[in-house]
Image (tube, helix red, strand yellow):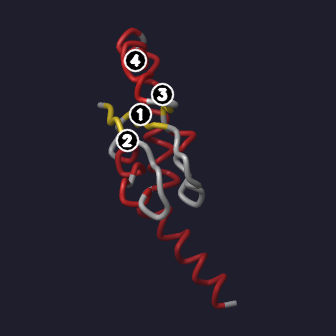
Amino acid sequence: WAVIYPGVYAWPHWDAKRPWEALGAGCLLICEKPTVCVEGYDWRELAVMYESVEELPDLCQDILDNREAYEELRQQNAEKAREYLGPEALAGYFLNTVRGEMG
């Protein structure tokens, strides 16, 4: 139902974390706020962010205490992720990028 990702600390290694796959699978993504640029396939607006691991216990308790609200958020974010970060969307992005490079 939820996935806690560790922080995204160094370019290009953030790509290996593949947070959009967790989102596309329908998980509530809980992630430490990235310290590097993650633009391009930006998933930050679809994740529940925390600043440091010390915040995690309180955040997890908030999720448990407000499960219905987080369930609604999870469903909305999964839908957005599938629309914008799913295979069709990524293939379209790739093809448009290639077309743009070819002039």
Out of 56 and 98, give the one closest to the viewer: 56
Instruction: Write the residue at 35% across / 14% down.
Output: 64
| Residue ID at (46%, 37%) | 32
* Numbered label attached to residue 6: 2
Residue picked out by circle 1 = 30
Q: CA distance from mark 1 to mark 4?
A: 10 Å
Residue bearing mark 4: 63
**Residue 74 pos. (x, y %):** 42, 31
Q: Earlier in the sequence, mark 2 or mark 3?
A: 2
> In the rendered structure, which disc, 3 or 4, sits on the residue that comes first in sequence?
4
Mark 1: which secondary structure? strand
Q: Which residue is mark 3?
A: 73
Q: Residue furthest right?
A: 103
Q: Is residue 61 above or below residue 74?
A: above
Q: Marks 3 and 1, how far apart in space?
A: 12 Å
Left or right? Give the position of 72 relative to 25. Answer: right
Q: Earlier in the sequence, mark 3 or mark 1?
A: 1
Which one is in front, 55 or 4?
Answer: 55
Q: Quadrant of the N terminus?
A: top left
Report the Cα–Cα distance between label 2 and label 3. Answer: 20 Å
Few, some or many C-alpha atoms within 10 Å of disc 4 (few <14, some 14-19, many ≥20)?
some
Is label 4 in a helix, a strand or a loop?
helix
- As drawn, which residue projects farthest toward the bottom? 102
CA separation in Å, label 2 and label 1: 9 Å
**In x, y percent, where is residue 13?**
42, 61
